[in-house]
Image: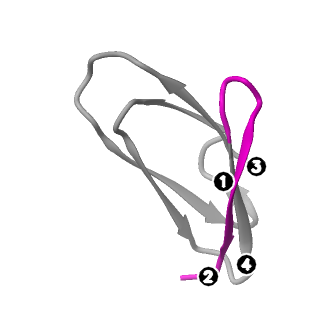
Amino acid sequence: MAVIAFATLGVRAASLTIDQAGQHFSQKSLTLTAGDTVVYANRDDVIHNISVIDQDDDADDLGLQRPG
């Protein structure tokens, strides 16, 4: 599972990628600023469920991501 934290600094938005391969994420955690975009790249041959957990431990289920 990858954990994503949000920060609210006045920094330009970025696009960040988390890869899934070998049933592991490329990063354990990721800190974002408001407006950032996260791209999930499923390079496995199995379906993954994507959940985002914020700094208050509230989870948002983004659903299943097929390989590719």
Q: Are marks 1 and 3 in contact (CB under 8 Å)?
A: yes
Compute the Cα span from label 4 to label 2. 6 Å
Compute the Cα span from label 1 to label 4. 13 Å
Mark toward the viewer: 1 or 4 = 4
The residue that disc 1 covers is 25
- The residue positioned 72% from the left and 57% from the top of the image is 24
Q: Which mark is residue 67?
A: 2
Of the residues under marks 1 and 4, which one precedes in the sequence? 1
Q: Is residue 40 above or below residue 48?
A: above
Apparent side of residue 35 relative to residue 47 in the rendered image (left or right): left
Compute the Cα span from label 2 to label 3. 16 Å
Question: What residue range appears in magenta?
Answer: 53-68
Considering the numbered disc 2 on the image, is that residue within a helix, a strand or a loop? Answer: loop
Q: Position of residue 64 (x, y in %)?
A: 69, 73
Q: Is residue 41 above or below residue 14?
A: below
Q: Position of residue 36 (x, y in %)?
A: 37, 40
Q: Are marks 2 and 3 in contact (CB under 8 Å)?
A: no
Apparent side of residue 57 relative to residue 21 in the rendered image (left or right): right
Considering the numbered disc 3 on the image, is that residue within a helix, a strand or a loop? Answer: loop
**Residue nearest the observer in this picture, 34 or 30:** 34
Type of amino acid at the residue the image marks with label 3 = Met
Q: Are marks 4 and 2 in contact (CB under 8 Å)?
A: yes
The residue that disc 3 covers is 1
Of the residues under marks 1 and 3, which one precedes in the sequence? 3
Q: Which mark is residue 47?
A: 4
Q: Is residue 63 above or below residue 68?
A: above
Q: Are marks 1 and 4 in contact (CB under 8 Å)?
A: no
- The residue positioned 27% from the left and 17% from the top of the image is 10
Dividing the picture into quadrants, the one containing residue 43 is bottom right
